[in-house]
Structure formats: C-alpha cells, structure tokens
Image (cartoon, rainbow, N blue to C red):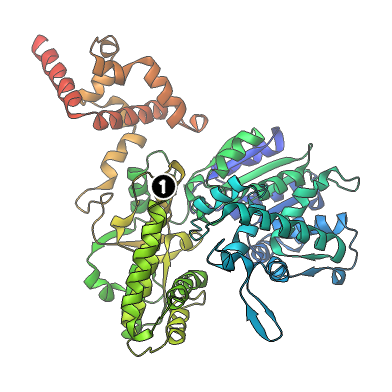
Amino acid sequence: MELSEYQQKIIHWLLNGKGNGCCNAVAGSGKSTTLKLVAQALKESGVSPAEIKIIVFGKANSQDLITKFGLIWKNSICTLHSAGYTLIKKELDIKNPRNAIVNRDKYKKIGQELELINYRAGGRTFRGKLKENRVLAHDSDFVKLVHLIRLTNQEPTVGNIENLCFHFEIEDVFKHDVLASSIEKVLDLGEEMAIDRKIFDYTDQVWLPVKWNVAQSSWFKPYKFVLIDECQDLNATQLELASMLAGKTGRMLFVGDPRQAIMGFAGADSDSYYNIVRRTKAIELPLSLCYRCPKTHIRLVNKIYPDIPIKATANAKEGTIEQIIEDDLDKYLKPHDLILSRKTNPLVSTCIRLLAKGVSAKIKGKDIGKIIQQELEAIASLGGFEYKRFNDFFEMYKQAKIARLEQMDNSEQIIENLKDRLSALHTIYTARPEANSIEALLKSIDDLFSDEEALVVLSTCHRAKGLEAERVFILNPGDMPMTWENQLEWQEDQEHNLLYVALTRSKDALFIIGEAEWFDASEDTSEELKLITSSETSEDTSEELKLITSSETSEDTSEELKLITSSETSEDTSEEDCRFPFLLDPPEVRSYIAYKIHLKIRELRADQKRSLRETLERRRRNR
C-alpha cells in the first residue's frame, strides 16, 4: 500500500520524534488504516505489540480492528472500558473473572435499596423519596446523573449537579441540593460494593481506576505507546484513564476530528480534541485526504468551512449534488439510501410515509424512541388523563413544561429540543388512528426506532457519525446549523459540526431536500476555491487582490485598508488559518493567505467596501 504524505509524516514523527501527537483526521481519512500502519511501523522498529495499547470506541470496533490488524494484536486492541476493568481487577487482585460481577443496573438497584427511586416490596411498587418529596420528576434522571457525575470526573456538589442538569438538558430537577447529597451517598455505597463485593457497572470500569489513581500502585506498568482513536469523543474521565495508561514515560498518539465533536450532549467533552493538544503538549499532525467523498462534496465543504483542511484524493470520483423538493423524494429513493436530518420529527414523518408505501424503513437510534416514550408516559401520568382526550392533555403538558423551562437561564436549546420530541410524538399519534391506548402508542414508537438494518435508514445527524452510504439525502437542510438566542459557544460549534458530518457521509450522490443558506444550486463550488489551490491565484490580476498584496497598499493611510493589509493582520491570519504550513510550498501558503484576506473583504460592512472601491477608482484616475 502506498502511504500518503500525511501518513508518512505521522510515522516519521512517531519513530524519530519525541512527546505526544494529536492527529487532526478529517472525515473519511482512513483513521483505522493509519493506526494499523503506525502499529506495524512500531513493531518493525522493535517495539513489541505487548508494549502498545490501541484504544477504540465500542466492542464491535475493537473486534473489527483485531481482524484488520491480525491476531498478534489481539491483546493490544481494546476499549477504554476493557482497559480500565483490567486495571481494576489487578488493583483488587481478582484472579478469577467469575469472582467479579458486571451489572449495568448497579446504581439503580442501590437507589431502590435506599428507597430513593421507585422500588418493589411485598409484591407492590412504592414511590421513591425523590419523587415523593418533589426533588425530581423522573427516576431515570437520577440514574443518568449518577452516570454523568462519574464520566465528567466531578464531585457531586450542588453547583456541579446544577451545571450537569443544564448542559445535558435534564429539565425536571427541582431540588439540586437534596439530589446532590443523595448522589454522593449512592456513589459511596457503589464504591464500597466494588471493593467488598466486586460488583461494577460499565461506568465504574473507567471511573474507579481514575478515582483510585491505580497508576501509583507498585504493580502498574505503563505502555510505551498508547494510540487512541476518535479522541474528539473522549469525556473527562476517559481522557484521564487514557493518559494513565501511558504513565510518565509512554508516548501517546490521539487520532480524531475536532469537527466531528458532536456528542457534547451525551457526556463527551465538546472541546476534547483541543484540550488534549493543550494538556499533553501534543504536536498536531494532519490527516487531510478524504477517501470517502467525491470532489464536488469536498468543494462544498471547503466553500462553507475553508478552515477545515479536508481534501479529495487525486483519483476521487466527481460525484453529484442535486437539490430536490420533498414531494419528489419517493422518486429518487433506492435501497440502501441514507436519509439525514438535524431534527427527529422530519424523520418520523418521512419514515411513516415510506412505511405506508411498503418501503422497509427504520429510524436509527432505539434510545431516541425511549426518550419520546418517556414524554408520552409523563403525559399519561397527568391527573384525569383519558386517551380519547389525548390532544387536550398533550397541549396542557407542552405549555406547562415550556412555561417552566422559560424561567431558566439559557433554556432556548432545551425548549427547541423538547418541541422537536413532542412534535415527533404527535406525528406518531396522528399517524396511528387505530391505536386506542398508551400501550399501543408505545409499541408504535418501538416499531419506528431501531438499530436493526432496513432497506432505507433514516438518522439524525448525531447518530450519523461513522455511517456512510453511496447516496445520502439531507432533509430540512435549513435546520442546519441551528441557531437560537443566547446560544453558547460550544453549542454553536456543535451545530456547525453536525452540518459537516452530514455533508461527509456520501460516497457518490448527495441530495439536498429543500432550501439552505449554505447551498446554491446555481453556483459552481469549484470557482472560489481555485483561490486556495491554483498557482494562478498568486498572480491574480484582480484589482482588489492587487490592492491587498501590493507594497503600495500596505502604506495606505485608509483605516479600512489598514484593517486588511497591516502586517499584524497578515501575521495573525497565517498563524491561525494556515494550520499546517510545513506541508505547503511557500506559494501555496501565500495563496491561502490571499484567499483568507479575500474572505475578510467580503465580510466588511457595506460602507467599508464602498470606501475600498472609491480608493481603487481614485488610484486609477491618478495613474
């Protein structure tokens, strides 16, 4: 296999350099292939596979990588949960795996034993203290917070619980102080249960090694090299554990795409990639060739996000991008197509319509269905509920919940997501007139949401990461990137990342269903981007670019021109935007800077643009 220039530089750094590295790998860049090449190079240089730990997300990915790498790497490749569990067993001297128990409901059962959440006794179900005392509305939120406080590597203080509830949209918590003390008690009992009875849940497997700081134990031996895939999705506790595996002497190579960090809502650190770079003092190593997407799709991404260093391969197909109307979707669909949407409700409407026409279709994400079912059960629990009056109780629940959320600071995204879930629920209710009970409606939701295969798969953009298809359809493209009042910086970043993920799933044809500000079917996306790669750009005869690059311009006293052409501005631009200058020849660097300055001109206010044009015209007259 012929290595790309990026792969060659990564391997050269690993074999000859020092310290840690962070590989900025764009979508479809062959991350697992690069990890394999790196591992092979280390082995050929004399490093034993036993001295290398390769971390991936998910047991299935671990098995796939072992198949790809070969059985010699079987003990080197694992998930962070597996690596952490191995450390726990050594710390507690558990020699026989049968002496340890993994129970995913461990902390739920502790909560039930303490009568904090609903529990059964004598054949009856009793209401837990937390709901009885109006601490929270849903027992599942208690279990979720016990999970999140460990994943974020925090103590269960009142402030931390409040922040977690806000960040992860846990809406129905009313007494954070009582909840914090309850979680602290449950965590203490959970730790005792791990030590005394050797019972763990999956989050314990990454949390306890960090909490116990097992790297200080006499038996601990760090790895020489630790390679971590999908690092942009690491949460705080996982990052601590990954760093622990390398100890003080090992070297780490993190591989990930900061622009695919979209799981901040689910426990991941939304700024994980850059936190890793800062914390580990890692050198950034680009992996910029996309082997998945055709050239037209890459040009569109380059146009929308010129700061993303993604490139098509030289032999990539041209591909197509077509804008269609939603009414024509059925005419275009073929087996194995992938339909994406930022919101859930458009997927529900489309899936129901396809099923009615006999098309095998499923919405990916069984847990999304569970969340919608939770809203349905909350509506059904309202006093005096009758199914025949579903619409009345639905509106009552919706208005009451929105009114309460509006009292919170920065609740716009939470409200928007609530509306999306409730719209999806009402769409299902409307489409199932034969359902005459909550149980029947719950089953209808189960039938729609599944992680099983179907001829046509529908997915939210959050669920689409890691997916690919020959043909991809984007529903309601105008929903991306979503914006709202008081949007936080990490939320804005993730909204743009979701669009990037959606645009980089297709291997051939991309269909935009409807209008979007970021796409104009009449434009040739290749024209503006010639500025980045064409050597002609540096010799551009455009008056505006001459104005930017000429020495005469740099001495101009106009404030507007100083803003664009001052040496300070050009230095900032080259450092911030040309992130990998060592891979570019000087003319290409100058071309890239010129392009960024060109974008700066386009962003100036109308009066500044007018001033520039007047300056140009004055100079022409004076020649």
Q: Nearer the viewer, residue 368 or 561?
A: 368
Q: Farthest residue toward the front?
A: 133
Expressed as whole percent of the image width and height from the top left, the position of residue 582 reads 52, 29
What residue is rendered at 63% in x and 63% in y? 58
Expressed as whole percent of the image width and height from the top left, the position of residue 466 reads 51, 60
- Res. 473 visible in picture: no
User: SS for tag 1?
Assistant: loop
Q: From the viewer's perspective, is residue 345 above or below residue 23?
A: below
Q: Is residue 457 left or right of residue 543?
A: right
What residue is rendered at 72% in x and 60% in y? 186
What residue is rendered at 40% in x and 50% in y? 495
Q: Nearer the viewer, residue 527 or 372?
A: 372
- Crowding near the residue tagged with mark 1, few <14, some 14–19, many ≥20 C-alpha atoms within 10 Å: some
Q: Is residue 613 left or right of residue 89?
A: left
Quadrant of the image occupied by residue 428:
bottom left
Q: From the viewer's perspective, is residue 374 above or below residue 555?
A: below
- Res. 64 visible in picture: yes
Q: Farthest residue toward the left?
A: 621
The number of numbered discs placed on residues in the rendered structure image is: 1
Q: Nearer the viewer, residue 401 or 344?
A: 401
Q: Which residue is mark 1?
A: 410
Expressed as whole percent of the image width and height from the top left, the position of residue 76 reads 76, 56
Quadrant of the image occupied by residue 432:
bottom left
Identity of the amino acid at label 1?
A: Asn
Q: From the viewer's perspective, is residue 302 above or below residue 465?
A: above
Q: Nearer the viewer, residue 440 or 602?
A: 440
Q: Quadrant of the C terminus?
A: top left
Expressed as whole percent of the image width and height from the top left, the position of residue 177 reads 61, 51
